[in-house]
Amino acid sequence: MKIAIVCYPTFGGSGVVATELGIALSKRGHEIHFVTYKQPVRLEYLSTSIHYHEVSVPEYPLFHYQPYELALSSKLVNVVQKHKIDILHVHYAIPHAYAGFMAQQMLLEEGKKLPMMTTLHGTDITLVGSHSFYKPAVNFSINKSDVVTSVSESLKQDTFESFDIKKEIEVVPNFIDLSNLNENFEECKRHMVAFEDEKVITHVSNLREVKRLNDVIEVFFRIQSKIKSKLVIVGDGPDREKALQLAKKLNIRDKVIFLGKSNEVERILCYSDLFLLPSEKESFGLAALEAMAHRVPVISSNAGGLPEVNIHGVSGFLSNIGDVEDMAANGIKILSDEKVLENFKKGARQIAEKFDVKRVVCQYEKLYQKMI
Ligand code: GMT
């Protein structure tokens, strides 16, 4: 099939999933066309089966806001006509489903029927989409999609609760390509962040309010008082400074390492002993799955879809949102005994295997077939 994929090309989970899906589909013989404003960060190479089409939005002084949806839908019409695209798959409803619908309508005028799948990722529903500024347009474009998928059962329920959805939502979970996992680094570089006798605790996110970064610091503060350890924070965002101040106040600044945005997440996970994700909301928690694939147990909140990914007592532990005492106690339980840690490492990997790309990509393929 020839599939056009629209996504955010950034480090965010939805863009990562869309890119990895495109790569996996291309390996299975499909022709993939990414249509977005920048080459996706995880898309390292282009080939005869993976193409990238840039959406340019020229600055025009009359416009206070440059009309990205207009440029995207026009680009989609051109790409679909030129490359004879069979399916349009948009990731993240805002504004992609809306722009996709407009492209469909324009193509219909030319006699071309283009089926569209919309994959809901989380914040497009739980944080941004349900805001009254966007809600009617999001509601409309979800209902107009030929197939709608969500990345977890929890997100599906949230969507039905927040919107007036008239169609079925298929749950297709996020995934990881275990065959492509970089696990054998020549040099793990653990020594660059921790001493031999210290454990490494890691958090990866966009450091936004929803990630509860202060809870990450509070949990680590309690763990390091019992277990020699360092905290590595990967990513950047608005709550970085607040977290840094809290670490100073708690007198643990020298044990907290802020690495910023990094392309080396796999290398960091390869020397991590524990992963923290105490989010307020999380439709799935791709960062937790990536940690688990690298045999890193996860201490997380029980928000949203996290209980579908992090299995309590097997791959790590779940606690109520904000219960930093419980999270820390669970972390100490895992880290204070090497045998317990080893069991959780195995458990984390076993659960991650259930989300291997091979099991998930065929679910998308079946849905595409139905749409055609
Ligand atoms: O986590 C974020 O804030 C980024 C966001 C995104 O849209 O890229 O992530 C969402 O989609 C990911 C991929 O499906 C999920 O793994 C994340 O759980 C979800 N984030 C939230 O629901 C907060």
Image: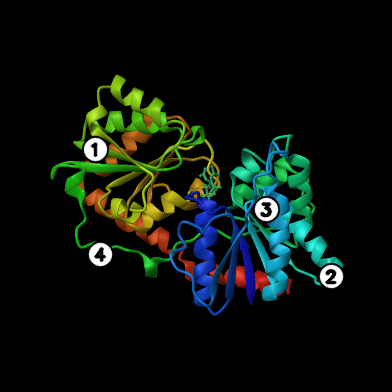
Q: Gap between marks 1 and 2, in whole Å?
A: 60 Å
Of pointers 2 and 4, the one earlier in the residue sequence: 2
Q: Alpha-carbon distance for marks 1 and 3?
A: 40 Å
Report the mark closest to the observer, 2 or 4: 2
Determine if the C-beta at disc 1 is less than 8 A from ligand 1.
no
Question: Which three-letter amino acid code belongs to the residue tagged 4?
Answer: Asn
Q: Residue furthest left?
A: 196
Q: Position of residue 299 (x, y in %)?
A: 38, 42
Secondary element under disc 2, as helix, strand or loop, is loop
Label 3 residue near ligand 1, CB within 8 Å: no
Which of pointers 1 and 3 indicates the residue nearer the eye? 3
The answer, for residue 85, to whether it is visible in the render is no
- In the image, is residue 74 above or below residue 341? below
Dot 1 and dot 2 residues touching (CB under 8 Å): no
Q: Tell whether circle 4 marks a residue whose Cβ is less than 8 angstroms from ligand 1.
A: no
Real-space Cα distance between discs 3 and 2? 21 Å
Residue 273, image x and y in percent?
A: 27, 47
Q: Amino acid at mark 2?
A: Glu
Give me the C-alpha separation between circle 1 and circle 4.
23 Å
Q: Nearer the viewer, mark 3 or mark 2?
A: 2
The residue at 51%/59% (across/down) is 39
In the drawing, what numbered circle is on residue 230?
A: 1
**Earlier residue among tags 3 and 2:** 3
Q: Which residue is mark 4?
A: 184
101 vs 226, left or right, is right
Q: Give the labeled residue for mark 2.
A: 110
